[in-house]
Image: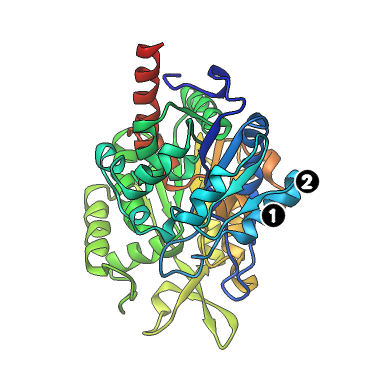
Amino acid sequence: MKILTLDDFDLKGKTVFVRMDMNCPIDPETGEILGTKRIEETIETLESLKNSKVVVASHQGRVGNNEYTGMSKHAKVLEKLMGREIKYVEDTIGEAAQNAIKNLQDGEILLLDNLRLCAEENYEFTPENAAKTMMVTRLSKLFDFCVLDSFPSAHRSHPSIVGFAQVLPSCAGRIVEREIRNLDKIMTVAKSPHIVILGGSKIPDRLEAIKALIQNGRADHILVTGLIGNVFLRAQARIKSPLEIKNEDEVVAKAHSLIGDYPDVFATPVDIAIDKDGERVEMDVREISKGDKIFDLGPKTIEYYSKLISGAGTVFISGPAGFFEKEHFKYGTKEILKAVANSMATTIVSGGHLTTALKQQGLADKINHISTAGGALVLYLTGEKLPMMKALEDSAIKYRSKG
């Protein structure tokens, strides 16, 4: 491993910036946290820093979506899990946050508010420019060290991901260390055919990765579900009316191009489920009418996909198959996960929403590797160098050259 870990340093008494990813599924109606897996994962790193002054930073949701909230509930969950006080401040880079950091004592943990409240954290930067942002220039002078343990965000070049590592000695936390070690081990023994099941709503990220997955021999068959499945159905002209999503023409055109370039790779839904007056209604894709909102896969699609999964050598799944937060539309996600868990393949399940669903079904012990990372893991499997990993490697070289 080309990166440094917590075992390479003595951080007792040091003030440490720890970039975590506590981005959890949030109930759109109540605002409550639905799955705490990502918060649970942070504990190992925090326990390793029990003699340090620890400042935890994370984001939650994206500006404008239902999961964009503050971090106060995350602090309460972490406090309950660790059985100790977690300090919290409703600030990210302002005077309140800076004072709270300065007043920390050894062994104390402070959680900052949602990093995306700071406008800079919503944009991508080069590492050099990230180091010049207000977030990094204001806060870095308060820290002795940086720990990057946000693997689900490793594909983003945000200031908190790549900026601090430019100006502070940095290493990987326990989550990142374990992810890289386990994934590299699994991929050395992975067998074909490689089945990739992609769902969720982050369409541009998925489309960018698909071609690389195919070209690098990581995807012999791609089964599309969720909103990305709807995009491919639209690209095939099997859904006639607009999907009413951002940059629709562009993403549909990309999906159409991918189908044209790799016609034998993609499997798309044959039946779906819509919401009709609060009830689940299943229908053939050909029966979809204008205005119908697709929220899940239908049973024929599950049967079709399950047969493909049963013959796989390696299965990678990322993103839910439908609006699984709603009871009526959990079916597709549950059945696909069941098919993956019961297969004889090497299996990797990724993404915060999917890991929550997996835990709910009690299937976790049947999966070879479970990661709360989604898009980052997809890109890692393509062989692409993730910005956070590059930042950690650069820091390791810089630290070793000084040491």
Find disc 1 in the rendering and name its residue. Answer: 77
The part of the image, by quadrant, that contains residue 290 is: bottom left
Mark 1 or mark 2: which comes first in sequence?
A: 1
Q: Is residue 368 visible?
A: no
Q: CA distance from mark 1 to mark 2?
A: 10 Å
Residue found 48% across the figure and 39% down from its top: 151
| Residue 83 - label | 2
The quadrant of the picture occupied by the N terminus is: top left
Residue 78 in percent (x, y) is at 68, 50
Relative to 84, say whether 326 is above or below. Answer: below
Q: Is residue 227 left or right of residue 237?
A: right
Residue found 44% across the figure and 22% down from its top: 3
The part of the image, by quadrant, that contains residue 364 is: top right
Residue found 61% across the figure and 65% down from its top: 330
- Amino acid on which disc 2 is placed: Gly
**In the rendered picture of this protein, how many numbered marks are placed on residues?**
2
- Amino acid on which disc 1 is placed: Val
**Neighbours of disc 1 within 10 Å: few (<14), some (14-19), many (20+):** some
